Amino acid sequence: MKPMNTSLAALLLASAMLAGCSGPKTLYQWEGYQTQVNQYFKGESKEAQVEALEADLQKIKAKNGAVPPGYHAQLGLLYSSIGKDDQMVREFETEKALFPESATYMDMLLKNAKGGAQ
């Protein structure tokens, strides 16, 4: 091979190898969701967690990203814990619509929330 062809071949090979190193695009945009769930179990401020999750939700929507499973359920649990039952119901219903496999669990949470309010 000529030196020019060798250089071109090496450049193409290096480009192909670097392209293979890029990670796959994730299915969901997690933002700070995992951190907020951890803080929930540590007993951190519920209001601060709601604010953080709502802010991250806006970021996800701005990027046309997909909300991960459990995101709206977590928001619903937080809303329930601070007495915002209307928003809790909205979040649980959104979770059911986005992830139909969660319907049984969301229905149970809704039933328990209504039973606890009586």
Image (cartoon, rainbow, N blue to C red):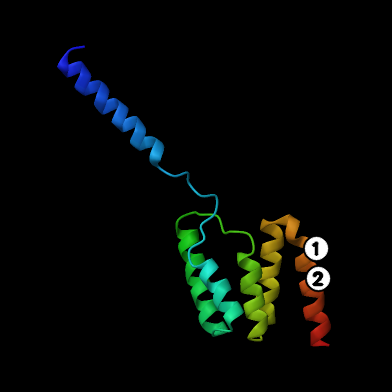
Which sits in the foreground, 70 or 15? Answer: 15
Residue 5 quadrant: top left
Q: CA distance from mark 2 to mark 1?
A: 6 Å
Whether residue 84 is visible:
no
Residue 96 locus on image (x, y percent) = 72, 61
Amino acid carrying mark 1 in the image: Thr
Q: Which mark is residue 108?
A: 2
Q: Are marks 2 and 1 in contact (CB under 8 Å)?
A: yes
Q: Nearer the viewer, residue 71 or 58?
A: 71
Residue visible at 71% across and 66% down? 93
Using the image, determine if residue 83 lies above or below residue 40. below
Q: Residue at x 75, y 56 (%)?
A: 101
Q: Looking at the rendered structure, which numbered label has been put on residue 26? A: none
* Residue 113 image position (x, y, % from top left): 77, 80
Mark 1 falls on what kind of element?
helix
Badge 2 element? helix
Estimate the x, y position of residue 36 in percent, counting from the top left: 54, 73
Q: Image check: 13 left or right of 77?
A: left
Residue marked by disc 1: 104
Residue at x 58%, y 72% (from the top left corner)? 37
**Is residue 19 at least partly visible in the picture?**
yes
Residue type at mark 2 is Met
Q: Quadrant of the N terminus?
A: top left
Single out the residue that lies furthest toward the left. 3
Quarter holding residue 75: bottom right
